Amino acid sequence: RKALELIRNPKSHIHFLSLKELVLEKVTTIAGDDASALLTFLQNTARLAIEDDRSYYENLFELYNLQIDHGLILLNGALFPGLVNNIVTIGINLGRLDWAQGFLENYKHAIPEEFQENTYLYNLASITFERKSFQDALHLLHQLDYQDAFLTLRIKRLQLKIYYELGEWELLDAAINTSRVYLHRLKKVTDRHKITNLAFV
């Protein structure tokens, strides 16, 4: 019933918190698949129900931790790249770098083999950047495979930030131009993604 109330009113902070509190209280008595579905629903609804960024990140952090603690984070034994990216990003945004890196190290084995190395290295580079070890982060990015368009966009964004922080203006200028050309030629992503990345550049 509480989930239905939130479906009907997805922007309701009250309905979001009401469902979250009930799931937190009853998670051990809810069947695993149902608990996972409810937690995923809460994660997907959080952005609509919570406007304040800090509160949004803290709520997601709590929900992800609950899934991890109760063994609900894996789907058929696997952890997919998008979820890894989301969890590490939440840890970074809350300044919990040790937690984010610990999660990454503990669950690297669960990432499907074809995505494992890229997902691991990119997220480790993001954490390393936040630790202000810019050259080390750049070294990690140089080891990545650029075949996936969405990953390539993330890599290029992080490279730009690193060059800026290092004051490498010529490299930054070249990377900006390369990113613009790549975005204009890219056909595998939506216009929204292109606009967001062009705005960042």
Image (tube, grey):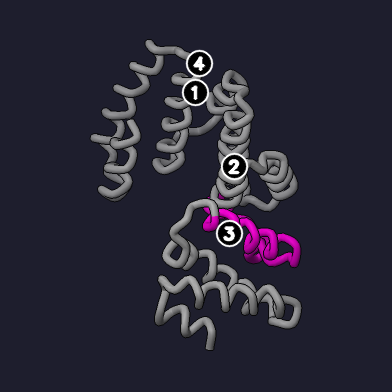
Q: Nearer the viewer, residue 156 or 116?
A: 156
Q: On the picture, is 25 further left or further right than 122? A: right
SS for tag 2?
helix
Most frequent secondary structure within the magenta stretch: helix
Amino acid type of the residue tagged 3 in the rendering: Leu
Q: Magenta segment, which residues?
A: 55-83
Q: Is residue 86 magenta?
A: no
Residue 56 magenta-drawn? yes
Name which of mark 4 and mark 2 comes first in the sequence: 2
Q: Residue at x 60, y 56 (%)?
A: 58
- Residue 89 percent across, percent down from the top left: 56, 45
Q: Distance of mark 1 from mark 2, alpha carbons?
A: 16 Å
Residues under numbered marks 4 and 3 in contact, where contact means CB atoms less than 8 Å apart: no
Q: CA distance from mark 2 to mark 3?
A: 12 Å
Q: Which residue is mark 4?
A: 166
Do callouts 1 and 4 mark residues in contact (Cβ within 8 Å)?
A: yes
Residue 43: where, in percent of width, then height?
A: 53, 64
Mark nearer the N terminus (4 vs 3): 3
User: Does dot 3 land on a helix, a strand or a loop?
Assistant: helix
- The residue beneath circle 3 is 60
Label 1–label 3 contact, CB within 8 A: no
Residue 157: image quadrant is top left
- Residue kind at label 2, given as amino acid type: Ile
